[in-house]
Image: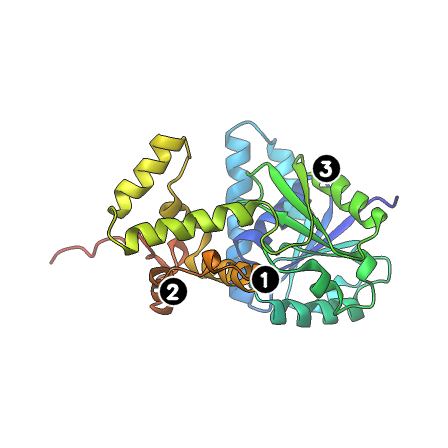
Amino acid sequence: MAETKSLAVVGGGQMGSGIAQLGAMHGLHVWLLDTDPAALSRATKSISSSLQRFVSKGQLSQAADTEALKRLKCTSNIEDLRSADFVVEAIVESEDVKKKLFIELDKITKSSAILASNTSSISVTRLASATSRPRQVIGMHFMNPPPVMKLVEIIRGADTSDETYHVTKALAERFRKMVICSQDYSGFIVNRILMPMINEAFFTLYTGVATKEDIDTGMKLGTNHPMGPLELADFIGLDVCLSIMKVLHTGLGDSKYAPCPLLVQYVDAGRVGRKCGIGVYDYRKPSPRL
């Protein structure tokens, strides 16, 4: 089984930058690709700040921080990924967009490279079908934020080989993650359970059962969840939650997965959560009074 020495991550958002950080922290040479230079600039700052937090907590030495940053390179040119042993896609949760990327990656990367998707709900088998190497395509779903959360959910497509699985599992364990394995069904394990709960929290708010604060407090104190479902939805991104609910509804064909109209309305209004300053809750700083 070949050891992974170089990692490419596509997508400079919170998930992609976090996965790139993990690779750099654990000795891999990392390319982080995004077509938007501003996204790469934000990602670099985010990674640097995150590494410093690890240093301040005594979980990483200053020397290791410096070395990790040296191993990380950012690019907007997909040609730079040619030499990568392992590629993780962490772009928008859209099957069509991901398939287009996988077609491109299949042409660019070396024949031995493994192509992994950080998808949280989309069929790995269908993504793999867009390539000439379905045996080397796999789902590698990190939790948010990747440097902190301890779980990686691995999803084997219909044709994923044992070697691809073992290389992916070894990489996750190198990152000091606990691995769980799911069959390739919509939502996999975590989101198959989590997203309907979040959706039901929206229905609870939508039908006037309780306030958003009481819904979240009830779940935090009543079930020992660290965050309430509405607060968590804002953290994940309401657009991402809606996208996953649509995948569940279409893929499993049960009306219980139909997205709550209030969730749809918030996304239509651009209220997608923390990343834009407003979702279920308002995170914007109040304007100073004149």
Q: Amino acid at mark 3?
A: Arg
Asked if residue 286 can be seen in this view, the reply is yes
Residue 256 image point, x, y percent: 46, 56
Q: Is residue 133 left or right of residue 145?
A: right
Separation of marks 3 and 2 at Cα, in angstroms:
39 Å
**Up-down relation of residue 8 to residue 49 (above or below):** below
| Picture quarter with the N terminus | top right
Tell which circle, 3 or 2, labels the residue nearer the N-terminal end.
3
Q: Are marks 1 and 3 in contact (CB under 8 Å)?
A: no
Q: Secondary structure at mark 2?
A: helix
Q: Residue at x 33, y 68 (%)?
A: 269
Separation of marks 1 and 3 at Cα, in angstroms:
33 Å
Q: Is residue 234 left or right of residue 148?
A: left
Circle on res. 251? 1
Q: Amino acid at mark 2?
A: Val
Residue 224 image point, x, y percent: 41, 30
Residue beneath label 3, please? 174
Of tags 1 and 3, which is closer to the observer?
Answer: 1
Tell which circle, 2 or 1, labels the residue nearer the N-terminal end.
1
Q: Residues within 10 Å of mark 3 (few under 14, many from 20)?
A: some
Circle on res. 264? 2
